[in-house]
Image (spheres, helix red, strand yellow):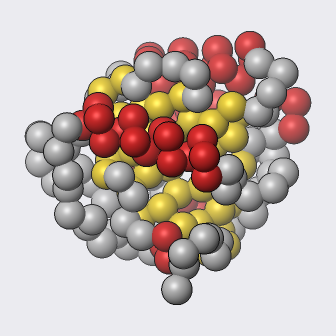
């Protein structure tokens, strides 16, 4: 599966995030392959799935339902993003018959990583999204990771 760099859809989803959150956060540094826990109760996470409405601070059930339904409903790959900030998020291409590939970014394009595993199961993706939202994700559970060189990456 190619890297998820379909920037038109990606940028549109980030614009939805900015509208859903309604404020701008300063990017916060996070540890290598360990998500930073939410800093305060006012942190907002937004779940965005291509073709759907953004969901602010999604529950476990909303994450599970949205990812499961989109992965099984469509013949075309669908993107899902759970964002804490405009440039800090986890994302996946939902393509049930080909396995899933996770990516995450920590505040800037230069800190964008992709799992080397191409065979993640839907349940692992759901687990990763929930753990990311809770600030407890351990990226090493999902294989090794490679930094991606994206457009405008110095």
Q: Quadrant of residue 43?
A: top left
Q: Quadrant of residue 21?
A: top left
Front one among 51 and 120:
51
Residue 110 vs 35, above or below: the answer is below
Task: Looking at this view, name the residue that lies furthest to the right.
Answer: 97
Visible residue check, residue 74: yes
Q: Quadrant of residue 15?
A: top left
How far across and down, in percent of the image, does residue 105 sit?
48, 61
How far across and down, in percent of the image, does residue 98 sit?
87, 38
Residue 119 vs 111, above or below: the answer is above
Residue at image location 64% in from the left, 15% down from the top: 69
Visible residue check, residue 131: no
Task: Looking at this view, name the residue that lies furthest to the bottom.
Answer: 154
Front one among 113 and 24:
24
Left/right placement of residue 39 relative to residue 69 reads: left
How far across and down, in percent of the image, does residue 90 sit?
50, 49
Front one among 77 and 92:
77
How far across and down, in percent of the image, does residue 145 sit?
65, 68
Residue at image location 36% in from the left, 39% down from the top: 17
Front one among 50 and 46:
50
Residue at image location 29% in from the left, 35% down from the top: 19
């Amino acid at each position: 599966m190619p890297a998820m760099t379909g920037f038109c859809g990606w940028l549109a989803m980030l614009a939805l995030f900015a509208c859903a959150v309604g404020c701008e956060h300063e990017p916060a540094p996070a540890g290598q392959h360990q998500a930073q826990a939410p800093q305060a109760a006012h942190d907002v996470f937004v779940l965005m799935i291509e073709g759907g409405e953004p969901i602010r601070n999604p529950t476990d059930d909303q994450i599970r339902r949205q990812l499961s339904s989109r992965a099984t409903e469509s013949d075309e790959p669908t993107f899902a993003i759970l964002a804490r900030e405009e440039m800090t998020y986890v994302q996946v291409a939902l393509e049930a018959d080909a396995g899933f590939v996770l990516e995450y970014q920590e505040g800037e394009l230069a800190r964008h990583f992709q799992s080397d595993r191409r065979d993640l199961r839907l349940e692992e993706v759901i687990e990763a999204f929930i753990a990311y939202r809770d600030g407890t994700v351990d990226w090493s559970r999902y294989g090794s990771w490679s930094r991606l060189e994206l457009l405008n990456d110095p």
